[in-house]
Image: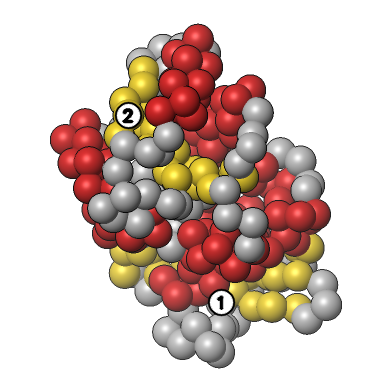
């Protein structure tokens, strides 16, 4: 892990910011902080952090609005930090393009592990030097983490890219949600399975002509998902 990898921590509770900052700095990260949504966007656009830890409940600009703006600006990895217990809130954040989430109260050591895992997915994909193609439709340039559909560039988040890449390497194979979780998180965690559905929804919105009738990234009901080589 590069010593100067920069993480932006966004939360309006100073004790949480201090705790996360201290643990991340001990782990070798450079840490930036923001206490509201507007400040978070200003810092992110000025400093271009490598990852953002983003609380959903923020003053001035809600965390979901911040995530939406960050996604318009680029593909910086986002870990949501939330005290909200409703699954719908977490899924909403994931559907906006967040890569992971941590629910308060949380272990600071777990947070550091999550940061490392998300960054590994990003750097790991860039370390592989190959191009994966599915028929004449889908191309994934792994070193550059770039995706093209019918020659059109598509912007995916690091987690979305890894999910699609994992399935595209074996077209036609059906992957369960647990297997896809294992691919992006390193360990299958059943409680996160709806997160896979949220990421799949995002990927389809970006790569399918009609996300409601997907031809490239298909659902196998009762089992999971697969990438196909069929005509679109």
Residue topped by disc 2: 33
Is residue 174 toward the left or the right of residue 100 in the image?
right
Disc marking residue 228: none
What residue do we see at 71% from left, 39% from top? 186
Q: Position of residue 48 (x, y in %)?
A: 25, 35
What residue do we see at 64% from left, 56% from top? 85
Q: Position of residue 74 (x, y in %)?
A: 29, 51
Residue 37 lies, with reference to residue 211, above or below; the image says above
Q: SS for tag 1?
A: loop
Mark before the other along the chain sequence, 2 or 1: 2
Which is more toward the observer, 104 or 187? 104
Which is more toward the observer, 168 or 73? 73
* Other-residue count near label 1 (Cα within 10 Å), few / some / many at <14 / 14–19 / ≥20: many
Residue 155 falls in image quadrant: bottom left
Residue 158: tell me if it is visible: no
Is residue 188 toward the left or the right of residue 31 in the image?
right
What residue do we see at 42% from left, 43% from top? 54
Given contact means CB atoms under 8 Å apart, are the residues at marks 2 and 1 in contact?
A: no
Choose mark 2 or mark 1, whichever is in front. 2
Q: SS for tag 2?
A: strand
Which is more toward the observer, 92 or 161? 92
Which is more toward the observer, 106 or 51? 106
Is residue 196 toward the left or the right of residue 95 in the image?
right
How many labels sit on residues?
2
Q: Position of residue 175 (x, y in %)?
A: 75, 63
Residue topped by disc 1: 216
Q: Position of residue 108 (x, y in %)?
A: 60, 25
Q: How is the image coloured?
A: secondary structure
């Amino acid at each position: 892990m590069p010593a100067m990898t920069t993480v932006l921590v966004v939360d309006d509770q100073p004790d949480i910011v201090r705790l996360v900052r201290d643990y991340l700095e001990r782990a070798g990260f450079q840490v930036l902080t923001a206490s509201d949504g507007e400040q978070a966007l200003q810092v992110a656009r000025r400093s271009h952090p490598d990852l953002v830890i983003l609380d959903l409940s923020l003053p001035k600009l809600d965390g979901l609005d911040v995530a939406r703006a960050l996604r318009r600006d680029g593909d910086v990895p986002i870990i949501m930090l939330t005290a909200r217990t409703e699954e719908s809130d977490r899924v909403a954040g994931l559907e906006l393009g967040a890569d992971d989430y941590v629910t308060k109260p949380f272990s600071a050591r777990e947070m550091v592990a999550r940061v490392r895992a998300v960054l590994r997915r990003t750097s790991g994909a860039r370390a592989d030097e190959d191009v994966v193609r599915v028929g004449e439709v889908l191309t994934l340039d792994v070193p550059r983490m770039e995706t093209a559909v019918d020659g059109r560039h598509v912007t995916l988040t690091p987690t979305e890219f890894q999910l699609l890449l994992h399935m595209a390497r074996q077209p036609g194979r059906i992957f369960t949600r647990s297997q896809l979780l294992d691919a992006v998180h390193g360990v299958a965690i059943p409680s996160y399975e709806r997160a896979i559905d949220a990421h799949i929804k995002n990927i389809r919105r970006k790569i399918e002509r009609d996300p409601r009738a997907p031809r490239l990234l298909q659902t196998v009901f009762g089992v999971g998902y697969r990438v196909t080589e069929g005509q679109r």
